[in-house]
Each structure stands twice: as C-alpha cells, then as structure tokens.
C-alpha cells in the first residue's frame, strides 16, 4: 500500500516564510561576525557600534594631519586597510579612551605602528574626520606576516595645504622648530586698535547669523553693531592679558587679532588679567566658566582655542622687535611680568580640544584679509608638545 502525504498550501507558504527568515537571520549573523574594512567603516558613519579591522598607521592630531613618527600622545590612533597608507582620506581615526591608552597609544607603544588591530566602537566623526569613538574592545597588535603590507611607512606627516607657508619649519622639532616658526609668523600686517573692531566682526562672525559675532568665553551670539563699553555689549578681550608684559593697546601685541576676541563687557571684566587654570567659582553670564583669586577657566568648547592663542603669542613675540619676550609658565601669579600660566594646563586644553571649523576659519580669515600670518598651532597642533615637551 502506498502512503500519500498532502501538505496544505497555507502550511507550505508558512514553512517557506520561516525558511527565508531563518536564512536572513543567519546571513545577518554572519555579516555581524565579520569585521568591517576601514573603507567600509569610513562609509558607515552612522553612530552604530561595529568591529573594524585595519593597520595602525599613525597618530591623528588634526583633521588632515597624522603623525607617522615623533608621536606626541596616546589619545588616538589612525587605522587603514594598508599598513603603508599615507592618505588621510583612507584612514579611520580611532579615539583611545583612558582604559586603552597605556596599551595602544603610539607615544607609549611606538612599535604598534604597522600592526593589525580589530577595534569595536561607535562609528562617528572624530577630529571632524571619519572615525570610531568610545571603543569597547581592541584586539590584535601583532605584525601581519604579509610582506606586501608591512612595508615601513614614511616618517613624514601627510601633506597639508599650508606646507608651502611652513616649508622652512617642516621636519624640525624643539628649539629649531620654534625659531623657524617665529621667523615665519613675525611677517605680519600690523593693525591699529580701531581696526581690531572691524577685524573681529569678520574673524568671529557667527556661522549661523552673519550679522552677529560669537563671544569667546560666554559663547553668546550678539549683533556686530552692539559693541562698546556698556553693560551687555561686547568689547575686545586680550586673551594674553595686556598687563602681562605691559604692552597695552599699542600697535603690535596689543592689536594682534590672533589673541583678541569679542567678549561680553562684564565677563571680560571678571576675567581681568587672570592667568589660566582649572577651578574656582562660577562666573556670572558665562556658563561653564570658573574663576578664583588668581586664575580663570573658560568653557570646555574653547579651552583649546585659548591655549593655542597663548602659545602663538609666545612664538610670535620673542623680544627681538621692541616688544616684550612673552612666555607661558606654570605660575598663576605673574602680575605685570611678560609671562602667563599655567603651561601644563594649557597643553592639556590644547590636546583635549582640537581645532574646530570655527577656529580654522578664523585662522584663515586673519591670514587672507587682516594680518597675513597664521597661528601655527591651529594648523599643526602636534607642534605644541614638540616645542613644550
């Protein structure tokens, strides 16, 4: 006797759907288990948490700058699909949070350069560049046996549009770098104090409202025309306090727009001529600003800006052109001496708050339209630790 089994059409359809769902889930699991390439990670900047495999190719220190030697810190690594990659557009910038720095930071572990690594973390911009932040897993770190991918990478940094401007300084470090930068940036157009009003209306223009400027400490957007000495107006803040060297507002350091910024009259008065350091009591009309008897702490979003302006002044004004020899130190009681502090804090601020689009635009506008010189630490923030190790 022959047994015939009949399958109802509806059950067959359900079975087919279940099979499709099973296969799809299996495929997704297989994909999830396979790390992304760096190229795929660059194209997937959607905030998702993904594993990415690549080769450690350097230390990112700015949007288009990756150190391939002379590493300055352990805060980030750049990875690429090829160990010899030099193009920053083909690199993923990986943030190293505190738990990973001792094991993976290139300043501490320069031998990690060129090794293969798999990182799991959030795919999102870092240094205004395709990146991966808040890593939860980092594995690997052994050299790849494939000789085609272990060619020692070049020791120079990737090229930059400003390389011609800094040509005589590239490749130098320490005092030699400092001397070269001074010779480059001292060639500026000197403004009058009245011209500073017009310059700041251009350099610090609110990107969301061309009729306004952004005050540096308060972060408030205020009408360009509302400048002066009245309450709630904005005036010209000397980030390097003009009494530190007693240069006042005469043409020169007193009118150098690289360290002059718009600020609320009251907040400017509260800052006074204080040195920079962490801590203190809250400052009125300046959210996330702090002060005590001898120091001022700006909001987090501009700490790096403040540091780089101070360090610019130290390189620009070396005492060889009739102006004081300005220098940062680790004091917060400098008075009228041509010093300002704290250097150790300023270095941390510069590293923790890299140059953003606003600061870069400002540097470019000063160069193009007003003084025709640049702040080298906005273009190359890695030079901070080379000059002040």
Image (tube, rainbow, N blue to C red):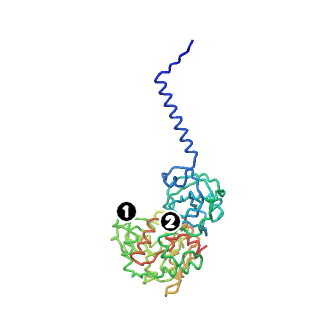
Q: Looking at the picture, tell me which residue is in the foreground, 19 or 371.
A: 19
User: Which residue is depicted at the point 34% across and 68% down?
Assistant: 223
User: Which residue is depicted at the point 37% across and 62% down?
Assistant: 208
Residue indicated by mark 2: 64
Question: Please, is residue 75 above or below residue 15 in the view?
Answer: below
Q: Position of residue 77 (x, y in %)?
A: 58, 61
Q: Looking at the picture, tell me which residue is in the foreground, 274 or 308.
A: 308
Q: Position of residue 269 (x, y in %)?
A: 44, 73
| Mark 2: secondary structure | loop
| Mark 1: secondary structure | loop
Number of residues whose C-alpha sits closer than 10 Å to that of mark 1, classed few (under 14), some (14–19) or many (20 or more): few
Question: Please, is residue 177 above or below residue 143 in the view?
Answer: below
Q: Position of residue 287 (x, y in %)?
A: 46, 63
Please tell me in which quadrant of the rendered image residue 196 appears. Answer: bottom left
In this view, which residue lies farthest toward the bottom? 322
Disc marking residue 208: 1
């Amino acid at each position: 006797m022959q047994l015939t089994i009949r399958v109802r059409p509806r059950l067959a359809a359900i079975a087919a759907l279940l099979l499709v769902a099973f296969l799809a889930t299996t495929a997704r699991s297989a994909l999830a288990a396979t790390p992304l390439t760096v190229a795929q990670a660059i194209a997937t900047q959607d905030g998702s948490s993904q594993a990415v495999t690549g080769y450690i190719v350097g230390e990112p220190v700015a949007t288009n700058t990756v150190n391939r030697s002379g590493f300055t810190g352990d805060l980030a690594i750049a990875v690429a699909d090829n160990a010899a990659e030099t193009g920053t557009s083909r690199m993923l910038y990986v943030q190293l949070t505190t738990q990973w720095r001792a094991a993976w930071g290139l300043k501490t572990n320069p031998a990690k350069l060129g090794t293969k690594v798999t990182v799991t973390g959030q795919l999102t911009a870092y240094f205004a560049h395709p990146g991966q932040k808040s890593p939860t897993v980092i594995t690997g770190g052994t050299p790849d046996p494939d000789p085609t991918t272990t060619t020692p990478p070049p020791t120079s940094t990737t090229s930059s549009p400003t390389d011609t401007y800094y040509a005589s300084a590239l490749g130098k470090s320490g005092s030699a770098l400092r001397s070269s930068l001074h010779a480059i940036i001292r060639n500026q157009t000197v403004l009058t104090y009245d011209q500073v009003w017009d310059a700041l209306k251009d350099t610090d223009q609110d990107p969301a409202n061309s009729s306004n400027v952004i005050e540096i400490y308060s972060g408030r957007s205020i009408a360009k025309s509302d400048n002066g000495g009245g309450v709630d107006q904005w005036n010209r803040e000397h980030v390097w306090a003009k009494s530190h060297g007693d240069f006042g507002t005469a043409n020169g350091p007193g009118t150098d727009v690289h360290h002059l910024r718009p600020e609320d009259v009251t907040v400017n008065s509260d800052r006074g001529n204080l040195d920079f350091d962490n801590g203190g009591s809250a400052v009125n009309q300046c959210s996330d600003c702090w002060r005590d008897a001898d120091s001022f702490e700006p909001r987090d979003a501009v700490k790096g800006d403040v540091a780089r302006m101070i360090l610019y002044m130290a390189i620009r004004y070396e005492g060889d052109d009739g102006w004081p020899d300005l220098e940062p130190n680790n004091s917060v009681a400098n008075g009228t001496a041509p010093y300002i502090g704290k250097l150790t804090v300023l270095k941390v601020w510069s590293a923790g708050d890299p140059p953003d689009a606003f600061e870069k635009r400002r540097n470019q506008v000063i160069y193009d339209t007003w003084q025709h010189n640049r702040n080298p630490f906005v273009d190359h923030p890695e030079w901070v630790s080379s000059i002040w190790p």
